[in-house]
Image: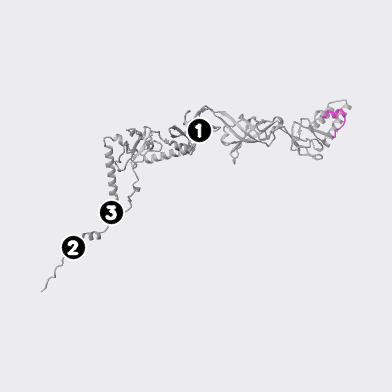
Amino acid sequence: MITDAPSVAPEATDPADAYADAPRDPNRPRRARWVMLALLALVVAVGLTWALTRGDSSDAVAEAPPAAAPGDGGAADASGDGPQGGLAQFDLNGDGVVYQSGMHPWIVEDEPGTCPICGMDLEPVPVSGAPAGTVEIDPVTLQNIGVRTAVVQERQLERTLRTTGTFEARDAARETVTLRVGGFVENLYVDTEGQRVRQGQPLLEIYSPELVSTQQELLLAVRNRELLGGGDGADRLVEAARTRLRLFGLGAGQISVVERSGMIRERITLFAPASGTVQNRRIVEGMQAAPGQPLMDIVDFGSLYLQVDVPERDLGWVRTGTRGVVTLAAFPGEELRGRVDYVYDTLDPATRTGTARITVPNAGGRLRPGMFATATLYGDLSEVGPVVPAEAVVRDGDGAAVILALGEGRFRPQPVTLGEEANGLVRVLSGVEPGDRVVTSAQFLIDSEARLAASLGAMQSMPGMDMGESEGMDMDQPAQ
């Protein structure tokens, strides 16, 4: 007899244990993240719909601005500096304060409250109604940073250049004494370099065998002409001898003396060809000199060249005829006047300067080559227009600007186009008008403040927020 085995009831399975043994879905954290994003988007959409459909939405909500291109003013409107008054249009009670959401800056109320989107308290924001780019500074800060201003004037500018130079002798005022015939220096009457001589003053005597023989030929030709009673042949011989002596440097008077006296002059005197100062004396008594050899220079210092440096930026207006006033440390309080008579075509690549030449009269011979001098060059007058102090201009890679003082502690950067600069003033071609007031000190601090305010305004005008950086929410962590 077979007895059936007692049936054993199966053990009850714990639901918790079954869930623990089930395989874990790897996509579950991603689905949870998308669910959270969807819920958040739904909350934002409901909040916007509620805010836009309120009965007083025209007074309470500022329309969310689109992403603005740089420079189109969108950022200025969002930050309260728009051309229609910005946040001032929401100040219905006129107390000068509106309340704005920090997370959603297009939510603006004229009374305290909470943001309908995020529920955060609205923050008070002062309303100034100032134009775009304006910054406000309290009087205490203005005094601490030392802000000074100047009024834009309307006037002409005269370009000036203060530079230095060195005196040089004029090339045309230099005479070089040479010999046309070889000989020996017998007597030298100029024994000191720098000695002043007059035109026609004896300089030296030479003995030249060639000159002696030519004089003998002249006297022989004269005697033959007298013996022959004249004639074309005899006259030609006399004239040929005279010509040779003239080519050797003898004057007509010296040749005539030889003919009348019938005596040969063994020594011939050389005279100064011009008045001036002896320089570069290259001879001494007893030395032999060859034909064409320079013996000394005679330089007229009645006027000198002043070679002055001209920076590259000023070469455009310094030209022939530019007026110059010259001063020297050797003669304090005295001014010498002259004009530029030549501008050289070369430019020094090391110093980036050119050279201009001024002819300066040297009355009394007090000026000497090699002296240093200071010259001030004066250009033509500019057209009448607005001018500002040079220190008021703020230059950067984008151009130039000034800081306009609008009054009551308000300032605004203003781009300008610049013209000529002279005597610490700059002519403004566009950007300001006569009577405007510009900042001449601490303008860099104000300009930086204005740029920072514009950057913050542009950041506030961007719709939405970066969910990846939301505090307390890490989207990369899987759900637990």
In which quadrant will I find the N terminus?
Answer: bottom left
The segment highlighted magenta reads 254-266
The picture places residue 302, in percent across and down from the top left corner, at: 70, 30
Q: Which amino acid type is marked by label 1? A: Leu
Dominant secondary structure (helix, strand or loop) of the stretch shown in magenta: helix
Tell me the element at label 1.
strand
| Residue that badge 2 annotates | 12
Q: How many marks are shown on the rendered structure?
A: 3
The picture places residue 391, in percent across and down from the top left corner, at: 51, 35
The picture places residue 81, in percent across and down from the top left corner, at: 38, 35
Q: For label 3, count other residues whose C-alpha is less than 10 Å away and answer few (under 14), some (14-19) or many (20+).
A: few
Q: Is residue 421 left or right of residue 340?
A: left
Numbered mark located on residue 418 in the image:
1
Looking at the image, tell me whether mark 2 or mark 1 is earlier in sequence order.
2
Dividing the picture into quadrants, the one containing residue 56 is top left
The residue furthest left is 1
Tell me the element at label 2.
loop
Tell me the element at label 3.
helix
Q: Is residue 172 visible?
A: yes
Q: Which amino acid type is marked by label 2? A: Ala
Asked if the residues shown at circle 2 and circle 3 are in contact, with their CB atoms under 8 angstroms apart, the answer is: no
Q: Is residue 420 left or right of residue 203?
A: left
Q: For label 2, count other residues whose C-alpha is less than 10 Å away and answer few (under 14), some (14-19) or many (20+).
A: few
Indicate how the structure is coloured in the image.
one colour
Dividing the picture into quadrants, the one containing residue 19 is bottom left
| Residue that badge 3 annotates | 28
Looking at the image, tell me whether mark 2 or mark 3 is earlier in sequence order.
2
The picture places residue 23, in percent across and down from the top left corner, at: 26, 59
Q: CA distance from mark 2 to mark 1?
A: 94 Å
